[in-house]
Image: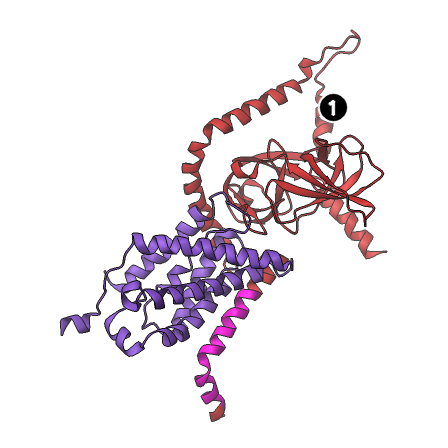
Chain colours: A purple, B red
Amino acid sequence: MSLTVKNIIRFAVFILFQALILNKIPPLHRFIVPYLYCLYILWLPFNMNRSWLMIVAFLFGLSLDYFTGTPGLHAAPCVLIAYIRPFLINVLIRQEDIEAHYSEPSVTSMGWAPYFTYIVLLILLHHAYLVLIEWLQFGNILYFLGKVIGTTVISMLLILIVELLFYRKKELRKSISAS
Amino acid sequence: MRNIFLFLRRYFNFLFFVVLQITALLMLTRYSRTHEAAFMHIANEWVGTINEQYNSVQYYFKLKKINQALANENAKLRNLLASNYTTIDTSILLKQDTVRIDSIIQYRQYFWRTAQVVGNDIFSQNNYLIINRGSAQGIKVGMCVLSDKGIVGMVEYVSKNYARVMSVLHRNTKVSAVLKNTGVQGRVAWDGTDPTFVILSNIPKSEKIKMGDSVLTSHYSNFPPGQLVGTVSAIVNDPSSNFYTIKVKTGTNFYTLQFVYVVENKMAEEINAIEHTNKMNP
């Protein structure tokens, strides 16, 4: 399956899973909201243009927003992590090695430690920005910190489960595997 | 000029990022003020259709509870039938007078429509519901939504076949309420923490309040008067204030909401017009 088709299907699956399943389950605590959808942006291919990355992230966040009835609330953090993503990948791994061989970030392409640093940092950033926008009128620092930490922890658990369930095999890029 | 283009090329990504951020935040702030957003009309129809598909599955699992709620409500309505009340005085007879009915219709204030909830959000700060009735079925912005056990919210956006309802569990919702026993006015709002409780404020400390007292909508609210908001479940006595802050357990169970009533206030236009003129000539 081509990478584009795969990402389009993923787009729909992540949105529907977040909007119809994760947003409906009763909360364990008011700090804990399970967010998984932002993993889609972290899984987008390496070689994507940065402007395209941000456009896709914006549309992705906006489509979830239409389900929750808050246009812009999820789009803003999505664009933020899409913007930060290339910087972080540059810092964490040696680009020329990886990008020549693999198409998208995963445990196999980046290794456990860099991959999870990448995930944790961006998820934390996403949740911090999301909760900041959401609680801006409220202004209670304890709620803010509690919700960011609680939501990040539960999201990380979910992401770990997803990574183990849908173990993405080595996806060598065609030019290399053919040669 | 060349330098400007060079600058734009150099920082294109950053500028693009800033533009997208501003767009997103503008959409959010404009939306919470006017409830109008880009592509909202199409998006509302699409989301409504998907939610309805999903709800048809969910609905099946809640049938038992819904049946019970409907049966209870039928019993309640049957108890209100005029034939249940016998008159002792034989000179007073219940008669159906056509002329009188006509005049009642003329002054009818509230018109109730049923609707099914197809999308329900309760865990965020500002919660919305989606119902499967829209402008084609006569729903208008500002109509009140009630369940069989209490108030639910207010219609804030209407597309052709679906409507979005601002739930009571929304930070901008303020409902004028009254304590059933004493008749004291207060204001109900949500503090954004627990979806089973709302906060009733502005009740003076001179009032005697008991746990379990009913809280009803007042005559000043947009809701039909006398509809249940909830029951008093905790009273917070703040020594620095002359007013109690009361935690009210909502009558409506927002977790299992399936059927609601959309209430049209036939006099709403007139009331609004009067309010408007008052503001114009202070």
Residue A82 appears at what percent x and percent y?
43, 69
State whether residue A3 is above or below residue B164: below
Q: From this viewpoint, which residue is outermost toward the front? A: A113
The quarter of the image holding the C terminus of chain A is bottom left
Left or right: A170, with A31 as reference point: left
Left or right: B218, with B8 as reference point: right
Three-letter code, disc 1: Arg
Residue A150 appears at what percent x and percent y?
51, 54
The residue under the point 46% across, 51% down is A34
**Stretch in magenta:** B4-25
Q: Quadrant of residue A147?
A: bottom right
Subunit of mark 1?
B
Would you say residue B5 sits in the magenta stretch?
yes
State whether residue B51 is above or below residue A47: above
Circle 1 — which element? helix
Res B42 seen here: no
Q: Which residue is mark 1?
A: B100
